[in-house]
Image (cartoon, rainbow, N blue to C red):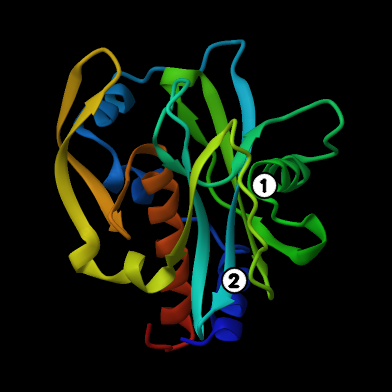
């Protein structure tokens, strides 16, 4: 699938009903699925956040921007989309995602076209309601990581996410010494993409597949 076809398919499919939590929870840990079954709701002081899932063409193939966070904080060392909490100056959620992406990895807002939004996802450990914003750029970003927040930038080929051999299970050790058995993850350039990022990414992959199917395009 060429870049233009990918973007047009995603744009159209994001105007249709989303795959939603069903797609997200196929990449959830066993513990996270239990949280869903227990029907834990966000607290009244939930932090609203937005992340940017951005496609761009590189070496003739679609890529997506990811980053590894530093070894500090609640999500230390985890792979994520650029993004963060809503601030007073943000006019809307896409503005939050673009501002954070610029601050964290130097993605320039003027280079990004917004395609739409995925299903919001609550992250209990940080009491955040994360809104995934989907966009694209026609240029490869001039990445500059913020050393206070970003340990590494990951230029992830979309083809890796679509490759079933990259979908694996592992026992994941989390803060507090707990081990999450048989946790699903995407193996991307030897980085473990799991948790909320994998859940949001899986919904985006379903959007891509649905968009291709509707137009009879092979991916």
Q: Is residue 41 visible?
A: no
87 in relation to 182, above or below = above
Residue 26 appears in view: yes
Is residue 147 found left or right of 78 in the rendered image?
A: right
The spot of residue 74 in percent (x, y) is 44, 21
Judge left or right: residue 105 versus residue 178: right
Q: Which dot marks residue 56?
A: 2
Closest to the observer, 166 or 27: 166
The residue located at (56%, 85%) in the rendering is 5
Residue for point 50% across, 75% down:
62
| Residue 176, above or below 195 | above
**What is the secondary structure assignment of the residue under circle 1?**
helix
Residue 201 horizontal/vertical position (percent): 43, 53
According to the picture, the residue beneath numbered tag 1 turns out to be 101
Residue 21 disc label: none
How far from the left and from the top, in percent, is residue 26?
28, 47
Mark sitting earlier along the chain (1/2):
2
Q: Relative to 201, is 206 above or below?
A: below
Q: Residues within 10 Å of mark 1 (few under 14, many from 20)?
A: many
Number of numbered callouts drawn: 2
Where is residue 82? Give x, y as percent.
58, 45
The residue sitting at 82% across, 35% down in the picture is: 90
């Amino acid at each position: 699938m060429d870049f233009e076809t990918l973007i047009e398919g995603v744009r159209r499919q994001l105007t249709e009903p989303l795959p939603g939590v069903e797609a997200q929870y196929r990449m959830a840990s066993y513990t996270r699925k239990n949280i869903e079954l227990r029907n834990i709701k966000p607290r009244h002081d939930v932090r609203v956040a937005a992340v940017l899932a951005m496609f761009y063409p590189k070496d003739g193939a679609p890529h997506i921007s990811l980053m590894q966070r530093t070894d500090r904080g609640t999500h230390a060392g985890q792979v994520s989309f650029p993004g963060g909490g809503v601030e007073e100056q943000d006019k809307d959620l896409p503005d939050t995602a673009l501002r954070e992406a610029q601050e964290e990895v130097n993605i320039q807002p003027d280079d990004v076209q917004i395609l739409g939004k995925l299903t919001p996802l609550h992250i209990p450990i940080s009491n955040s309601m994360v809104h995934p914003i989907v966009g694209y750029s026609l240029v490869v970003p001039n990445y500059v990581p913020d050393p206070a927040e970003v340990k590494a930038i990951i230029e992830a080929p979309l083809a890796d996410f679509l490759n079933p051999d990259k979908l694996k299970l592992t026992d994941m050790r989390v803060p507090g010494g707990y081990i999450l058995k048989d946790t699903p993850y995407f193996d991307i350039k030897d980085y473990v993409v799991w948790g909320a990022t994998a859940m949001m990414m899986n919904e985006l992959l379903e959007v891509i597949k649905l968009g291709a199917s509707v137009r009879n395009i092979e991916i």
